[in-house]
Image (cartoon, rainbow, N blue to C red):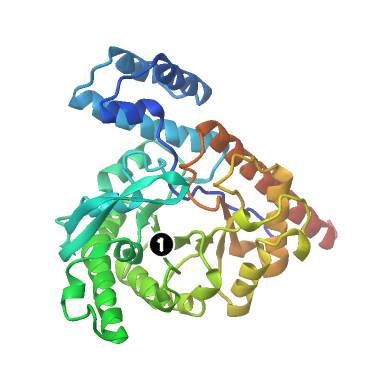
Amino acid sequence: MSDVRFPTREIGSLGKPSWRVKTFAGRPLEEGDIAQAEQWGKRLEVEGYEQLVEILRRGKFDEGELSAIDDWAAIYALRLLERAGLDVVYDGEQRRSEMYDHVAAFARGFEPRGTVRSFDNKYDVKAAIVEPPSVEGPQDVEEFEFVRAHTDRVVKVPLTGAYTMEDWSYDEHYAHEGALGGSAERRYEARRRFVSDVATNVILPNVQGLVEAGAEWIQIDEPAATTKPDEVPLVVEGFNEATRGVEARKSMHICFSDYSALWPAVLELDDCLELQLEFANRDSRELGTRDDDRPGYAETLRLFKEHGYPNVGLGVLDIHSDFVEPAELVRDRILYAVDVLRDPERIQVNPDCGLRTRSWDVVYEKLANMVQGTRLAEEVLNRSSAVAGGI
């Protein structure tokens, strides 16, 4: 029997360094911003980081220098994830404004309508759909090619899902097709058309371009998945249409939801490797592998077991807290999941969600402990397997 090994991954976003944020906002850099670039360059052993420090010290940046700063932010994020020990990485979405706006600003058919307050006092752009959405070509190929060229780890590309794009937009097009004020069935059909058009005409071209460029893993992010529980089938339809005919690993990330609303609709996901979910945010910080010790995991994992869904991306880090989970706590969360699902091959390990709300110091410690705790869980399982096998 081969040894148990749990792949470790991030989910997508990391906070942007202050020197990257300020240069693109046209705000003056302070000495602390430059010191941050220098300190992290040394800490992460970023080759040639002195070039970045030299650019930042000039204080004025032309288009070429801004492009170079963007590149450096992506490289720093990659090195942070690599140094923490992750098996699967991306660049923390350093080039993206925000997961919704990144798509809405690129695709035709969306018009900005101001900002809205999101969680943790962040403000994000909200747009209206005013005509059927479309794109001229894939959006993120250059971004992916840069990441792939600067890491030897497995690369997983995160993309915002069609249902979230629909749910987070004002509808000034589909609702006018007779659905506004009409029956519930007509309103549902209008939303279904919106989701389908985004999936087919915006996301699928991006996925196809990425896979043609060599991407082997596409992660579809659907934070709005259970906002309206009766519309979970639309989430599934959006995923299937956005990845139809694509030969790559495909997974879905859903954060901070009522996961009971996903079943049984998610059983209709086509060729979806796993659901990557949030667990740690609702869990105890005490050690242990009994049901009472792991209140954040018991109910949702039993849904996987009951419905026979194959794989779970197990969230083991609370991304809304600076609490650094001890490696032993990560270990016990993984061991509990193995005990419930009875098959370690059904489990991969990640934070609950993207870590953009946390400082890089906290992120590094959390991720490093996540990797260490994962290795501890592997040791326990492999030792037990060896004893059971009489070795």
In terms of secondary structure, where does tag 1 sit? loop
| Residue positioned 30% across, 65% down in the render | 166
| Residue positioned 64% across, 40% down in the render | 324
Whether 334 is drawn above or below 229: the answer is above
User: The C terminus is located in which quarter?
Assistant: bottom right
Which one is nearer the viewer's eye here, 270 or 360?
A: 360
Give residue 84's position: percent from left, percent from top.
56, 36
Q: Is residue 90 left or right of residue 193?
A: right
Residue 342 seen by the camera: no
In the displayed image of the protein, which residue is found farthest to the front?
181
User: The N terminus is located in which quarter?
Assistant: bottom right
Whether 28 is drawn above or below 129: the answer is above
Give residue 312's position: percent from left, percent from top.
56, 63
Which one is nearer the viewer's eye here, 146 or 219?
A: 219
Q: Which residue is mark 1?
A: 222
Q: Quadrant of residue 309?
A: bottom right
| Residue positioned 62% across, 78% down in the render | 306
Give residue 351's position: percent from left, percent from top.
55, 50
Q: Quadrant of residue 289?
A: bottom right
Whether 94 is drawn above or below 72: the answer is below
Name the amino acid type tagged 1: Glu
Q: Is residue 345 left or right of residue 81?
A: right
